[in-house]
Amino acid sequence: MSTCKLELVSLAKEYADGNVIAVDGINLQVEAGETIALLGSSGCGKSTTLNMIVGLETPSSGDILVDGTSIVGLPAGKRDVGLVFQDYAVFTSMSVRKNLAFGLEVRGKGRAEVDRAVAEVAELLGMSDRLDARAKDLGGSELQRVAIGRTLVTKPSILLLDEPLSNLETAARMAMRNELRRLQSEIGLTIIYVTHDQVEAFSLADRIAVMDAGKILHVEKSAVICDKPSHTFVAGFLGFPPMNLLRGRFEGAGNAAGFNNGAFTLPVPETPALPKGICTMGIRPQALHLAPEGGAAMTGTVVLLEPRGPESVLTVNIGPTKLKALVPSDVRLSEGQKVGLNLDYETVLFFDSEKNRSMDFQLNAGRCA
Amino acid sequence: MRIVRPGGLSNAAIARLFTLPGQVVSLLVLVMPLLVALYMSFTDWSPTHGSLFDASFVSFENYSELLVWDTRFTYAVVRTLLISIVCLCLEFTFGLGLAVLFLRKFRGKSLLFSAFLTPMMILPVVVGYIFWMLFQSNGPINQILEFLFGPQAALEWFRSAPTAIFAVILTEVWHWTPLFFLILLSGLNSIPENPIRAAIILGASPRQVFWRVVMPMLKPVITVAFVIRAMEIIKLFDEVFMLTRGGPGSSTETISLYIYKLAFNDFQLAYGAAAAFLVLLGSLMLVHLLLAPVRDQLLEGNR
Amino acid sequence: MLTKNLSPLQAVLMFAALVVVLFPVFWILMTAIKPPTDWNASPAIWFPSEPTLVNFKTLFDPDALGEYGVGGVSQPATKAVFGSILATFVATALSVTIGLFSAIGISRYGNGSKATPLVILSGRMFPPAAIAVPFVIIFSNIGLIDSYVGLICIYVAVTLPFSTWMIKSFVDDLPREIEEAAMIDGRSKLMAHLTVTIPLIKGGLFATTMFIFILNWSEFMFALVLSYTSVSTIPVQLAKYVTATAGTLYGVQAALAVLAMVPLVIVGYLIQSHLARGMTFGAIKQ
């Protein structure tokens, strides 16, 4: 893996003498020029991971390699890694210019060099006319720019962003998202960024690493990860709405085969070598379609219909089980109404019941008898 | 929100009602005496001259005497200012140093915190008395000096001007450094951590982080501490009264002590009143100078 | 994560500072329990040869004091302790009560003008000497000199800015909606404040009371110039002892000093978390 810009090797962080495990041995390879998102809910260990990469915290075990060399022993500030904080942490007592110059000034760089670098970055961020403004007078997205610019001035080879957009209002967020994408392509930085917002992750990252409880569960190209999650947590976390997960087992065989989840049995098309024992079935909401009640694979009661632009999210109760489906928004349904549902069997995923990992198994396409 | 009820009082009326007692007290006990004193300062009255109304009006004579001829007054003013400046700088330095140490982790922190606050909880007169005792020629300070530097190192602290002033300053610094410590520590603790982290990541050394990032953020708190202490130390009286009574000669005499002596030892009440008014005017100007940078923080910061 | 442990050098510095801070306190406590033979020993005795409480007894015993009798020393401290307690307690209660109403008035019904606080703040900076001169003259004309009434009046006036401003900072912290709910209930505004506002700032009122207590108990100059024979306070008595006997009465003086400082130190520790607020007129909240 010599092309790796950054590599995390079994990286772990424990607090309170091992009683609290914040990061539980994660492995991650980031290639040069790539943007990767660490996606997870708060407390999943993503910020601790960032802090370890940047040097604010020392790993309990494991290693961090940049260009193949370990940086664990280096103090923060000598790692060639930049971090932009969620609250920006701009030096409010200084002007924008002083903020941008800070990283070079503390390194004792000459005046001319500092001025040139500051001007360059200000130009890049479109803040050339705001250089003499006081940082405390700046608005949200301007602060964000200063925070990024302050880091870029020191020309880090890796840029870490902690929830970069979450403190911005919607309009500013859109603008900043475009801005980040532009920076990414213009400077070719390696960017790792932490977020709890999938939209942000999908729109900015080349790859997404989903974290939960200190572990990275799945790293995949953002275009793929939603359709082919490798873990039930990822399946139940990504997507709008996320995948329906049904726990149950296959019964019968051939024409009479079905998936019994306790509440009902879903007939499945003839498929050889059905998995034995309990497993979890993952059905994307896009794969469920409304069908006439008779002859549908499942029938249930409408609980809720949430319009969402061109599509609506339909929640259907089949016994105690809730399923969410995406339906065209012109469908008229009322609460309590009986509906039938069919599904695209070939897109259904299966996860083993012990490790919650995806299984190498697919149903045949087609309708069941 | 306004609640209008028939027969109810308007907000302005309630405001007046609530603040009335305070205003009456201030008027009777602060403003009225000041007016009397103001009148008196233009007369040549002294207690032996009978009623104040019989005293003859001397216009600005007291004031010109004070400002032009009374070098003791001028010296007292300059001395008070110098002592104040030296004390404040020392108190700030020590207080900041201690506050920075308290950012570290160590055991028994809260106990030590209380211990370090102890001096400011002791009343000034007692502080003056304690140090008067410590500085006696057979007191422990001389004992320690003799132990360290031999028998000739002992000093008669209150017999020469420089050592007496040193004793006053040391007492004052011991007494009030804890206040700086308290204010600066609470300021340091309320500084957000992320800018500090950002500075570290940007490659700043601990020293650079402190001077370039922490200190600028601490500036408002530092200013408040200085203003508050300046307002108090300019009135310096109790400790000096106990330590030296202004001596030897008048070499440790502060403004307050001088006015006290004028009025209550020499019974030159009119002259003393004039001095008091000059000091008052000076104090007012100083207050406004001092308050300018923190006015909003001190007043609006309450909201 | 940014906090590091104390380095050995820093630990040494901290220890040295602690010694400097505590030594004077140690000295006064030790002196207060020294037997008379140890008082003025040369070289000074650090630990009393026989710790004793006799100094505290002598303090209140005119006959015992008479043995050292120079000038005012023969006067026992009984009256001073009584005077301090009386003046401090009454003045503190009055100051906090009046300050409470002023604080509610300014905080809830004030027009937000900046003049009020500026006047209050400026009032704190007047040198007491400047106010003491006219006081003595007026009080001697209306017979309030050398009386507790006069002393209490001054104490209240001088501490009122502190109590008002400190309580105001606590009332400001309280959301108005709480009182307004009570007002809509049909109670009068005064009742709303009595039954809602005041109970809610109990903690703040306690801290303020203690703080004003500290100020009054410590006061020296006004007591010095307004007291002759019938009125006395501990600080004045202490000053008298020191004048009259320059250097022979250490034990008794120290005993009185300890009596004066012990309540303050206890109260000070009690309201430790509010000290900064009190001292800075609420500009620093912690």
Image: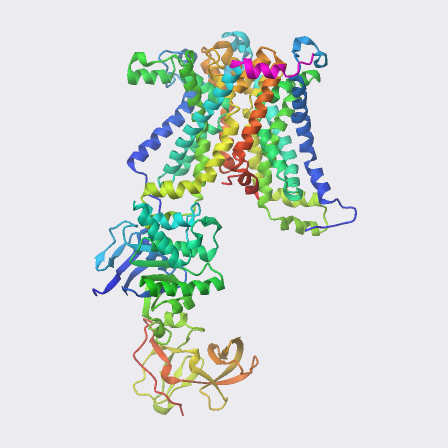
Name the residue located 29 percent from the left edge and 58 percent from the top edge: A157
Q: Position of residue B123 (x, y in %)?
A: 50, 25
Q: Quadrant of residue A217?
A: bottom left
Name the residue located 66 percent from the left edge and 25 percent from the top edge: B29
Is B72 covered by the magenta stretch? no
Q: Quadrant of residue A209?
A: bottom left
Quick one: A111 or A78, which is closer to the camera? A111
- Look at the image and name its color scheme: rainbow
Q: Position of residue A360 (x, y in %)?
A: 29, 79
Compared across the picture, whether A29 is left or right of C86 comes to left
Q: Position of residue C175 (x, y in %)?
A: 60, 48
Quick one: A98 or A239, which is closer to the camera? A98
Rendered position, A87 above or below B114: below
Residue stretch in magenta? B56-71
Q: Is residue B33 visible?
A: yes
Is B62 covered by the magenta stretch? yes
Main SS category, magenta section: helix
Q: Position of residue B204 (x, y in %)?
A: 32, 46
Rendered position, A150 above or below B40: below
On-image quarter of the N terminus of chain A? bottom left
